[in-house]
Amino acid sequence: MTTLTGFQKKYLRGLAHGLKPIILIGKEGITDTLIRAIDEGLSQHELIKIKFNEFKDKDQKMAFSGELSAGTGSALVGMIGHTVIFFRSHADPAKRKIQVP
């Protein structure tokens, strides 16, 4: 995944505004099962929200977000409160739902 520009991130945050978090991260933290679930969610939706339930420290959430981004090959679009937004375009160009400007 290439890095996103500020305008592209803003566009994707706007698209994600109406979405509900599909994955919740609890006290277990980052596990292989969690990474597989995020990977599957990105494959289906391309743009997803993830919510941190147990972790309230911003630095810790940013570290986890970086790990998740690297583990899934996705781009971190933004963090709002305890919710993180990730984007990864579909590998098949014919199946892409979101066209990033």
Image: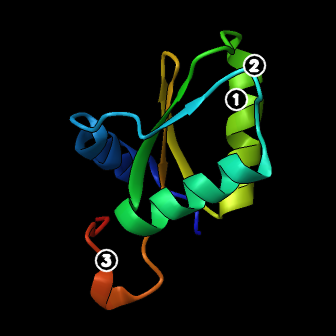
- Circle nearer the N terminus (3, 2): 2
Secondary structure state at the residue bearing disc 2: helix
* Residue at the image position 40 percent from the left and 62 percent from the top: 46
Q: Tag on residue 20? A: none
* In this picture, residue 4 sits left or right of residue 100: right
Is residue 88 visible to the viewer in this orientation of the structure? no
Q: Residues within 10 Å of mark 1 (few under 14, many from 20)?
A: some
Q: Residues within 10 Å of mark 2 (few under 14, many from 20)?
A: few
24 left or right, relative to 48? right
Residues tagged 3 and 2 counted as in contact (Cβ below 8 A) = no
Amino acid marked by disc 2: Asp
Q: Name the secondary structure under disc 3.
A: loop
Residue on which disc 1 sits: 62
Residue 59 tag number: 2
Say which quadrant the C terminus sits in: bottom left
Q: Report the mark closest to the observer, 3 or 2.
A: 3
Identify residue type, mark 1. Answer: Met
Q: Is residue 2 above or below residue 19?
A: below
Is the image coloured rainbow, by chain, by secondary structure, or in one colour?
Answer: rainbow
Q: Residue at x 66, y 60 (%)?
A: 72
What label sits on residue 96 in the rendered view?
Answer: 3
Verify CB contact (< 8 Å) between mark 1 and mark 2.
yes
The amino acid pointed to by label 3 is Arg
Whole-percent x, y for residue 33 in the image: 71, 51
Name, please, the residue furthest toward the top: 56
- From what the image shows, is residue 55 above or below residue 20? above
Q: Secondary structure at mark 1?
A: helix
